[in-house]
């Protein structure tokens, strides 16, 4: 399904997406069918559909823009992606109330967003990753996240940058 051109999105490039999923395949020693993913700022649903096509057990997608939400909702029905659900909400509000843990959280916020590191803070503080889980934040080249707790590596694919974090142990209470 081709996304309408009037959606306010910047989809992850195919080159970056291929690199990301090659990295995940080599890093994750787990069957996708046993994994739960969260796609934040999901835009057109590009990453959501990729997770679903690889057999993720469940994919929760969060998007605040109504046109994007509506497009993804129609796409999920059209392609019978019953393991996926779309939630229309502000990502930061959603992270504050979420009670589900995920194996993989992917966030693709607007590159110019000033508080991108708050995504990391909320995920860690709210203990939203299962042990061994990964948080991947896509961002532009000006954003640096390598100083944040649990950072393991950065990957660059042209103008697309991924900061990757791994939670090995739950936080001390």
Image (spheres, rainbow, N blue to C red):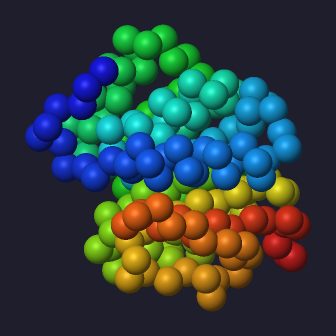
- For this orientation, the residue located farthest to the bottom is 147
70 relative to 103, above or below: above
Q: Is residue 56 visible?
A: yes
Instruction: Report the quarter where the C terminus lies.
Output: bottom right
62 or 145, which is in the foreground?
145
Q: Position of residue 24 (x, y in %)?
A: 69, 48
Q: Quadrant of residue 67?
A: top left
Instruction: Report the quarter where the N terminus lies.
Output: top left
65 or 78, which is in the foreground?
78
150 or 92, which is in the foreground?
150
Q: Position of residue 164 (x, y in %)?
A: 64, 66
- Is 34 positioned to the left or the right of 82 in the image? right
- Residue name at image x 61 percent, y 44 percent: 21
- Residue name at image x 62 percent, y 88 percent: 147
- Residue name at image x 39 percent, y 50 percent: 12
Q: Position of residue 10 (x, y in %)?
A: 28, 52
155 or 104, which is in the foreground?
155
23 relative to 164, above or below: above
86 relative to 132, above or below: above
- Residue name at image x 11 percent, y 40 percent: 6
- For this orientation, the residue located farthest to the left is 6
Q: Quadrant of residue 87?
A: top left
Q: Is residue 96 visible?
A: no
- Is 4 positioned to the left or the right of 165 in the image? left
- Is 20 positioned to the left or the right of 64 in the image? right
- Is 40 positioned to the left or the right of 128 in the image? left
């Amino acid at each position: 399904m081709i996304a309408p051109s009037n959606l306010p999105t910047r989809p992850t490039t195919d080159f970056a997406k291929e690199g990301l999923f090659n990295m995940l395949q080599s890093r994750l020693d787990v069957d996708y069918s046993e994994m739960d993913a969260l796609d934040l700022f999901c835009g057109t649903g590009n990453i959501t559909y990729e997770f679903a096509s690889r057999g993720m057990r469940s994919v929760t997608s969060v998007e605040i823009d109504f046109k994007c939400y509506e497009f993804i909702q129609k796409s999920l029905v059209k392609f019978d992606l019953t393991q996926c659900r779309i939630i229309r909400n502000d990502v930061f509000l959603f992270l504050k109330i979420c009670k589900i843990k995920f194996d993989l959280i992917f966030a693709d916020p607007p590159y110019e967003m000033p508080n991108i590191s708050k995504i990391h803070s909320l995920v860690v503080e709210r203990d939203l990753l299962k042990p061994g889980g990964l948080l991947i934040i896509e961002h532009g080249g000006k954003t640096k996240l390598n100083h944040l707790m649990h950072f393991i590596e950065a990957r660059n694919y042209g103008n697309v940058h991924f900061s990757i974090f791994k939670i090995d142990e739950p936080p001390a209470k």
